[in-house]
Image: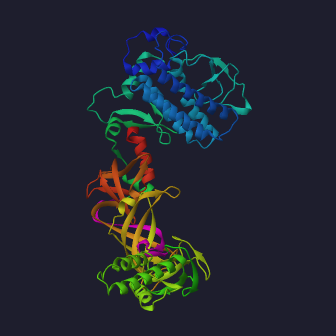
Amino acid sequence: MKTFESRRCAAPLGAVLLSVLLLAGCGGNGAGSPAAEPYSSEVSDALRLSMASYDRVRQLLIRDSLDGLGLEAEALVQSLAAAGAALGSGSIASLVEESRRAAASMAQSSDLDTARAAFGEVSRTLIGVAAADPLLIEGWSAFSCPMTKTFPKWMQPGDELQNPYMGVSMPSCGVEADWTVPRPESLEEIEAHAELVHGGGDPADGDEIAHYTCSMHPSVKRGAPGTCPICSMDLVPVTRREVETGVFVVDAARRQEIGVRTEVARLEQVNVSVRAVGRVVYDESRLSEVTVKYEGFVGKLHVDRTGDRIQRGQVLFEIYSPELYATQEELLAALESQRRARDTAAPDRADYLVSAAKQRLRLWDLSDGQIARVSAGGEPIQYLPVLARSSGYVVEKNIVEGSMVVPGQVLYRIAALDRVWIEAAVYESELPLVEVGQRAEVTLAYQPQRRFEAEVSFIYPYLERETRTGTVRLILANPNLELKPEMYVNVSLLTRRGEQLTVPEEAVLYAGDRRLVFVDLGEGRLEPRTVEIGVRSGDRIEIASGLEAGEVVVTSGNFLIAAESRLKSAIGKW
């Protein structure tokens, strides 16, 4: 193999050939070529990050270590992607993309030989890209290893030789090299290679070979048959039609070998069940608290245990309050003044005093019956009874006989348990499937045959930060008190989505942020198709777009079919 001298750079080659010549290091030694334009600051920064990641990978290989190789290779992939995005389109961007693909392959390496072969492929492109700007390679040196079977060159900071291809066995093996990258021996071969790779010739001839690639490493692209530089497998041809359409052929014998099965995409009723864990809580609208509006001292307790069932109007306890006692005396005095006024010229002059005293007692929560009792008795009641204003169960009790109470103090908390709430924790991804009024089924883990019907009454407008779940409130009748607050239950919410297009779940492949199926076009032809998926229903998945009812999709052997697709179709499909 020969390298190109600077006179080759003067030839009026197209943009397609420019990428090859840049890798060839136009301008003598390739470093500081006068014809090369410096990169923009954005591109330079991204490439410096790439070179730093590249060097950290090199240091791992020097130590014969794979520990952390995946992370460093991924960092290299990301920085090269940033450089490619900043470059946009053009020959240099194509080289950066080729380097990125090789780095991605290196991230998947499981042994040192594969990692070093992929490292060589990164070096083949990245050295030429870096050498195009002398500022990037300032302080760096290029070396070559005569003993490696991979691409022999590498670059590193400084001039102390450390060979990543030989590792700890021969770290100083190698010689200082220039920054050129070997390519085909003649310009005619370059032009033929560029025409072959980039689709020269009759565009109507779809069976023309576009390039050769490796079935295990699709990032490898060559213009002629040979072996993979990473795994040494024979390269196989990819036609232009396969590149442009993504359609590829898998013959019947090959299908049988890899166990391909297919199924028709069909319309069917889709029912989605959202399962959640729920907790039984009190119905907040049926909770009440017992307080007083005056200071006093508790006398006899009529309800003295938590958990007691009480009825509305039942006496809870008796209380003595100096203020309450004095107001009763005021009422009795006003009633006496009212009786005396009846025999005078102004018989209603004391009526307002009676009304004022009664109103004050009412505001202190005495019932009309209690006020009538005081009026009829003719003397104040020392210990007045305090009545329950709602029925339910005592769930909290904060007094004993003799306690002093103050205004607003919670003395009892009473809950009606004939109806309860269930607060179900639903994952945020499933919240769109839940709506108010939806029917739900509640079961107990220790009594699965017992089922309760409930209804969604409210969806809380926030998420729990720690669990990333939303809370859904269900209302459930509880006449027999089978459900007790703080019990855990299983909740199933059924959503009926009507008739939708579905395929078996195993038919869908996940490729990054894309979802694909393989459509069987007949006569052995398969097409990778991007689809939008919906919800899962049992072992099937809803297809929102990208597929029509009646089309046939591959449901088994998908991963091997995916290898065929990546091999034979455009990498842009993935």
Image quarter hosting the C terminus = top left
| Spot occupied by residue 272 in the image (x, y as percentages of width and height) | 36, 66
Above or below 523: residue 240: above
Residue 211 located left or right of residue 412: left
Q: Is 388 in front, or is 335?
A: 335
Q: Magenta: predominant secondary structure element?
A: strand
Q: Is 151 in front, or is 310?
A: 310
- Confirm whether the magenta stretch covers residue 266: yes
Above or below 235: residue 17: above
| Spot occupied by residue 358 in the image (x, y as percentages of width and height) | 39, 79
Residue shown at 72% from the left, 28% from the top: 171
Please state the extent of the stretch shown in magenta in the rendering.
Answer: 262-291
Q: Which residue is the extreme one toward the right?
A: 169
**Can residue 231 be seen from the camera position used here?**
no
Residue 57 located left or right of residue 78: right
Residue shown at 40% from the left, 10% from the top: 11
Q: Which residue is the extreme one toward the front?
A: 345
Residue shown at 66% from the left, 41% from the top: 67
| Spot occupied by residue 562 in the image (x, y as percentages of width and height) | 42, 48
